[in-house]
Image (cartoon, rainbow, N blue to C red):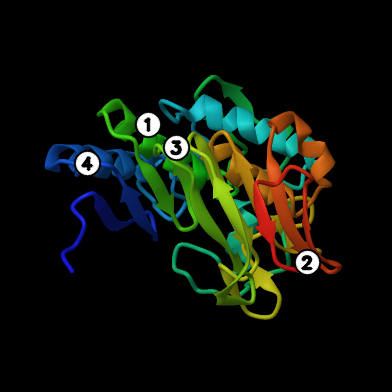
Amino acid sequence: MRPRPDLWRFDAIGTAWTIDTTSAVSASERADVTDLLARLDLTWSRFRDDGGIALLRSGETVDLGPGAEELLDLYDRLHAVTDGAVNPLVGAGLEVLGYDAAYTLRPHGAPVPAPDWAGVRRDGTTLQVPTGAVLDVGAAGKGWLVDQVAASLLAAGHAPTVEAGGDIAHHGDAPIRVALEHPGDPELAVGVVELEPGLALCGSAVNRRAWGDGLHHVLDARTGAPTRAVAATWVVAATAAVADGCATALFFTDPARLTGFDVQAAWIDATGLHTTPDFPGEVFS
């Protein structure tokens, strides 16, 4: 079978990407996407010592560039609805537990609460955080990157479906069916979503980036410790950024508090698999 010219797969920012379009993405359009992701990685990756996050860590005021205001505003809202559990200054806490630039995956200290997000200095896209604080936008950033790539391709005349590490922005012309991966077995599904054009689906699970005994990437910023109450979440929203951020928020807050985001959700906790009443699909009990 010949490979589809309209299906583009590549690796970037530490995850696998798939872009599905009705016509092949040209070489120049691919270069534009590659350049976009490289620029965003330089600005936002906490694993680099030559970019925006490193400058913020040193106490400098940094202009994070186009789209930053949208992402930071989203974090303001997520911080509020989770009573501070979602906080993009959680980076130092992740590093202490071993999720650092060297991927040591070995804790070298007790959990560290994040600095107060409400105390940062921000003006539009410009940000200053306390010296030593580490910005980590993993709670919503991958979805936001998916939105940026989708916007680039939409501007070039495509109707793309963009997927990165399970975060999907669907701009095709017909609904697609997406399986919800079992958090304990990637070969199994716990449900299926009917994702309509113009919507996004993002999921999060504590097993996706886990190491050691009870250590994973979903930290409660108030304590610096990994959360344990919820195993996996999925959210459908108008943008991948909102879907990604709310999927993280669901680890810490009741879904009723997310009504202002206009999302539909599913989640697994100790009592089983649950959905909001309007969840667009079916789950397997």
- As drawn, the residue found furthest toward the left would be 27
Between marks 3 and 1, how big is the CA–CA gap?
Answer: 6 Å
Residue behind mark 2:
228
Numbered disc in front, either 4 or 3: 4
- Mark 2: which secondary structure? loop
Residue behind mark 1:
151
Q: Position of residue 3 (x, y in %)?
A: 19, 62
Kind of residue sitting beneath label 2: Arg
Q: Nearer the viewer, residue 244 or 237?
A: 237
Q: Nearer the viewer, residue 216 or 114?
A: 216
Between marks 2 and 3, how big is the CA–CA gap?
Answer: 29 Å
- As drawn, the residue found furthest toward the front would be 174
Numbered disc in front, either 2 or 4: 4
Numbered disc in front, either 2 or 1: 1
Q: Earlier in the sequence, mark 2 or mark 3?
A: 3
* Labels 4 and 3 touching (C-beta < 8 A): no
Question: How busy is the neighbourhood of tag 4: few (under 14 within 10 Å), some, or many (20 plus)?
Answer: some
Kind of residue sitting beneath label 1: Ala
Residue behind mark 4:
23
Question: How busy is the neighbourhood of tag 3: few (under 14 within 10 Å), some, or many (20 plus)?
Answer: many
Kind of residue sitting beneath label 4: Ser
Residue behind mark 3:
147
Between marks 2 and 4, how big is the CA–CA gap?
Answer: 44 Å
Which part of the image, by quadrant, shows the C terminus?
bottom right
* Residue shown at the point (84%, 47%) measured from the top left: 254
Q: Nearer the viewer, residue 79 or 152?
A: 152
Residue 109 to residue 168: above or below = below
Residue 86 to residue 207: above or below = above
* Labels 3 and 1 touching (C-beta < 8 A): yes
